[in-house]
Image (cartoon, grey):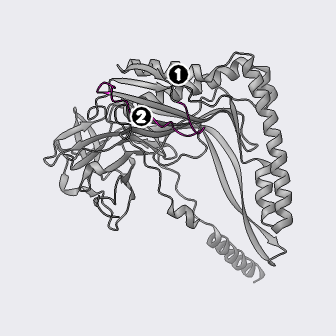
Amino acid sequence: MVLAGCVTPYQPVPFDRTATPVSKIAVVENTLPLEVGTQKLATNGANMMSAASSAGLAGLLVGAVAAGVEAGIESGQRERIQKALATQNFNGEAIFDAALEEALKQQDYRVSTIAIPRSKSRELVVVPANDAAEPGSAVLDTLGFNYGYQLVGNSTQWRPFVTLHVRMVDHKDPKKILLDNKITYNPVVKSDVTVSIPVDEAFAFQKIDDLEANPTKAAEGLEAALRATAKATADLLR
Amino acid sequence: MNQMRFSSIALLLAGLVAGCATTPPPPPPQAVSEITGKTCTDTPDLTKAIAMTPKRKAQWHAIATTIDGMSPCLNLDGKPSNYVVYALPSAPSNHTLTIGGLYEAFRILGPLVTVLNADGQPIRSFPAERFANVGSTFGVQFRPSDEGRFVLVQTNPQTAGIEVKAFETQLVTQTNYSYNPYTYGSSSYQTQYGREGATVRKFSHEGVVSVTIQAVAGKIGLPNEK
């Protein structure tokens, strides 16, 4: 709690197109995790761990076992979701990239891609300065922390989610941050000053069996989530 | 006599029951789609601007202003629109502002946001596409220019009454208590559960304006403060 009090709150950088005229955006390639993920919150295992840990050392052991069992279950569920989506040739990166490019072009940006190796996974790329970059050109990184299907406790259904960190810097002088924000599709907690998008309620599955029975719908749900997130990213650049 | 005693006991009991009954909280307010019976002005009253600079030095400051039937209104293209004005801190460009209408149970104040200069003239406004769900606010995020002195937030007559449907997922945390044999006392632990459901709100002329001010360097209004 004391530590939490000392943490500097996240500070977004809103983009101002009038004050900073950007006309050309190079979008960093390979921004989403390689595989579709899962996110399980408020599970029985997590709650058991919390309850058990209040009962001292022995409780911690019980809790750790419960959490381990829960992790094993989730790993199996993730594989089943991945297999179901693979039957639809689902490619999240391609869907997101195409939707982002389309939305940016609609806003009269010239769009290209740029390959910058990500030294640490789940961290924004370090953009090298490009002295030859023409004025008004920027590099946009849309780092996906995780995306896929999530289940919150036992009273909800499996629904799509996406968590993204977007940052745009000046290509000539990357120290100039032109935009920085975080976007969550289907957030469980609305964080202050970051962007959230409500989930499309049409895409929900009571059990993994239901998702496996209708992989087309599962792919459509995740596609809708990625498209909405890409559009929200482009909207921050208006 | 017996009958009298019985009725007095009954009365006493009734009184006790009435004494225990608590008044239920008022239901959450509904959206207000129209402003009626108000005389509106053509320009905002800048003398009543609410300071964005907190009394104590801070890097982060949040303000919630209730807009209700008593709030002043402006004529906006022939239609009334409730408003509130905020005075920007000194060194305005050193701040990130998140401003808009707060999500309430049944309504969201439908906001229009304009930055004004020292003369009260508009120098920046935001199109509908720039508004997003930011935290629990439907609003815009921006850094004002140093020419900015005030921010005018007014209700949008074009959107008032329009439904906003959203399906929401929530993670709810609750604190539980248990007997701890090691400390011979009670210890607390937290568990969480999920909740989800469809919500319907309407954009409203009344509600709450939410303002979050973050200093980029130093403190709010004091860019050189450590």
Q: Residue A97 carries which label?
A: 1
Q: Which chain carries label 2?
A: A
Residue at figure coordinates x 78%, y 60% from the top left: A51
Q: Circle 1 sits in a helix, a strand or a loop, which is it? A: helix
Residue A179 position within the rendered picture, expressed as x and y whole percent measured from the top left: 40, 37
Which residue reaches farthest bottom?
B1
Q: Quadrant location of residue A86?
A: top right
Q: List the residue tagged with mark 2.
A: A168
Q: Depth check: B39 or A133 in front?
A: A133
- Circle nearer the N terminus (2, 1): 1
Name above or below for residue B5 compared with residue A156: below
Q: What element carries label 2?
A: strand
- On screen, residue A89 above or below B225: above
Q: Position of residue A88 (x, y in %)?
A: 71, 15
Toward the front, the furthest residue is A131
Characterize the local packing of mark 2: few (<14), some (14-19) or many (20 or more) Cα atoms within 10 angstroms.
many
* Nearer-the-camera pick, A15 or A27: A27
Name the dominant secondary structure of the magenta segment: loop
Q: What residue type is labelled 1?
A: Asp
Identify the residue shown where x is 41% and y is 34%. A168
Q: Is the residue marked by circle 1 packed among few (<14), some (14-19), or many (20+) residues within 10 Å?
A: many
At 72% from the left edge and 21% from the top edge, which residue is drawn?
A85
Q: Do the residues labelled 2 and 1 touch (CB within 8 Å)?
A: no
Residues A124 and B6: in front is A124
Q: Give the range drawn in magenta.
A: A117-136
Whether residue A98 sits left or right of residue A71 in the image: it is left
Classify residue B36 as left or right of residue A31.
Answer: left
Query: What's the distance in space between the residues labelled 2 and 1, CA to CA?
Result: 15 Å
Q: Is residue B159 visible?
A: no
Q: How many labels does the image show?
A: 2
Q: Which chain carries label 1?
A: A
Assess whether residue A217 is covered by the magenta stretch.
no
